[in-house]
Amino acid sequence: MHSSRKLWTWLAIICVLSFAALGWVGKEIYLKAPPIPKEINSTRGELLFTGEQIQRGQQAWLSAGGQQLGTVWGHGSYVAPDWSADWLHREASALQALWAKRDFGQAYEQLTPGQKGQVDGEVKDEMRRNSYDAQTGVLSLSDARAEVIRGVARHYTGLFGDDASLDKLREQYAMNAGSLSSAQDQQALAAFFFWSAWAAATDRPGEAGLSYTSNWPHEPLVGNTPTAAAGMWSIASVILMIAAIAGMLLFHSTHEEAADPTPPVSDPLFSLKATPSMKATKKYFMVVVGLILAQVGMGVITAHYSVEGHSFFGFPLADILPFTVSRTIHTQFAVLWIATAWLATGLYIAPAISGHEPKYQKLGVDILFYALLFIVVGSTVFGWLGTLQHRGVDFSFWIGNQGLEFTSMGRVWQILLFVGLLFWATLLGRGLWPALRKPSESRGLIAMVFLAAVCIGGFYATSLTWGPRTHYSMVEYWRWWLVHLWVEGFFEVFATAVIALLFTRLGLVRAASANTAIILETIVFLFGGILGTLHHLYFTGTPTAVIAIGAMFSALEVVPLSMLGIEAYRNYQRSKAAPWVANYKWAILCFIAVGFWNTVGAGLLGFSINTPIALYYMQGLNMTAAHGHAALFGVYGMLGIGLMLFCLRGLSSRLAWSDKLLRPAFWTLNIGLAMMVFMSLVPAGIFQAWASVTKGMWFARSPEVIHSGFMETMVWLRVPGDIVFAIGTVFLAVFALRLMGRGKVPAPATAPVAGVTEA
């Protein structure tokens, strides 16, 4: 107990210091983010854009699909271009053509190497010169550059409008004509794209060769190449990671873990009688299966759009289900079904652990279920309709689709979900309270579950921190608080603690050793994980300190993943500890799969893009998608399915349980995911990385690459993996339907475990 208290103290210290540092970085981002000029003028005084237009343009882009329709500074979807890189290349190329004609009377391609060098130097000097006056808030540009900017702006107003000459390009980008119906919004959009490209190429005040985005994207025409800091901190992070892994191996070799206890003769949970609130969670798991099916279906459609653009095997599906909508549902439902599985698990285990059913607990569980269902359906329908009917920026932000990846639901739905999560934490606390008050060896584990639940509810408040006019750098800062800390941080702590509790309840793990191990694992995970959030923010208009801190701490995130193979092997041994453990075989195998995908998806594929130098070339390419698929479904998805199966075992008739359905479900899901990642996404990502290194980010995201023969072949090579994976979801759905249709759980022959009572 004394050792456990010291670990709790260290955990508190690390959390306080890490969040203090993260808060300080947020202040620095706010102070040093790329300025938004009040006016952008030519030297002859002609007004090009205003600051109001730049801010309105950000809202217009998000309402048109935002991060579901290309990217800005590398964050978003991968079929349409990165608009900041695309504008930057178009503007620099147009300047080359203009000055080649002016100085030499020829097209740029016809110039001699010496003449090209002269033009290239002039273009680079023009694009990197920071002519922003902080006193007046005015950005002054040369007349030649102003002429080029007007021409590039016309391209984007036509592209997001209905210019028929750009229909082919829109099809290649998987975007519909008239994405923005207002001419005012189209002009504002061009202002935002210009500003994002200007910040990416213009030197920061007092810095030579260093833009506001640390020279991202790679664009040789304007001298955007990796900074020395990106290279040096990448090397340092690799050295730190190797040293930390060696230290962890040394620690484990010198601190022998206690052996697992002798398992009970029979299943300790066989006679557990489900309380009314526990039974009420069953419908949550049925919704989980439904959301999985919907998410997979939308994923198939979304992937196919990268080949046909507007059609699904010839049918003009994009007229009613645009790419931006299908991808929104695909990414949003992934988070929602995983979160629902974990929330339901918490509600299920609380009475089972404490032996206490609070008064009106079932009513609370039912209310929460229908509230969450209302939020899921409402946010999806309103986001879909808002996109189809072009309802505008205010509708999109408040009740439609905000256009932000993984956090797309409108603000009203976010507020309702925040209230729902706080209500869930309250229900969980009510159920766990008797166990929290009672001294026991497992009280530390129970406390960890409850604290993680409080953090899950409380930290969703970060989704409410940005507004319609918040600077884009700060939107990204807060968005990654939510996506990284909420999903990859506290949800993972919660799930890990729940798994440990389940193993202790089964008598397969000693409560005292599990208690210590979970606190230690949480310390190691959050030590790297909290400040590791910054690796998402290297190039989003942030200070260079973000590269240093993000690189070092994101490297530490990999350290605990290196030991997960050992934990997976121990779980495999536990699955064979006694004959009755076979009842939980597939849930335990899901936990073993989590260890595998944590090592491969989060560890190997994650670290392959996490260092600053790697991410400089690969941010916003398919290597990111490979990591995302392997980590999101492989880790969090399999964890959610494993928890669901564990709970359903106690909620269903043993006669209705079918290992014959779970066996193919488990293997086809994992094999299909591996095929999808390694046959399609990884090769596509490597091909794009080559294009990014050799010519620039604009080229890696251009139709010439995206719709090249190789890339389209890679998309078609997703089909075998998608089919195998989809078969797994069908087996899982059939398994769930069988449980629903085969009667209720029979009454136990003996007294309930832990004496569960209703108060």
Image: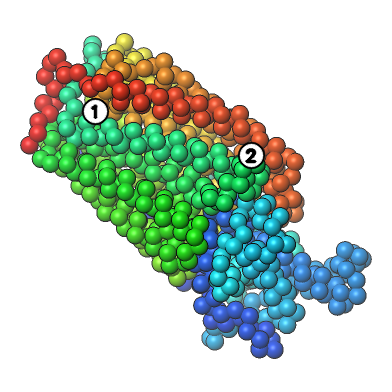
Near-viewer residue (177 or 500)? 177
Q: How is the image coloured?
A: rainbow
Q: How many marks?
A: 2
- Picture residue at 29% right of the left edge, 34% below the top: 283
Horizontal and vertical percent position of residue 184: 56, 74
Compared to 159, does 78 lie above or below?
A: above
> Which one is in front in this view, the residue at disc 2 or the one at disc 1?
2
Q: What is the three-letter code of the residue carrying label 2?
A: Phe
Horizontal and vertical percent position of residue 533: 45, 52
Q: Name the side, left or right, on which 532 lies relative to 136.
A: left
Instruction: Report the residue marked by disc 1.
Output: 511
CA gap, disc 2 to disc 1?
Answer: 55 Å
Mark 1 element type: helix
Horizontal and vertical percent position of residue 290: 39, 36
- Picture residue at 41% right of the left edge, 28% below the top: 733
Q: What is the three-letter code of the residue carrying label 1?
A: Ala
- Picture residue at 70% right of the left edge, 62% below the top: 164
- Picture residue at 67% right of the left edge, 61% below the top: 86
> Which one is earlier in the sequence, the residue at label 2 or at label 1?
2
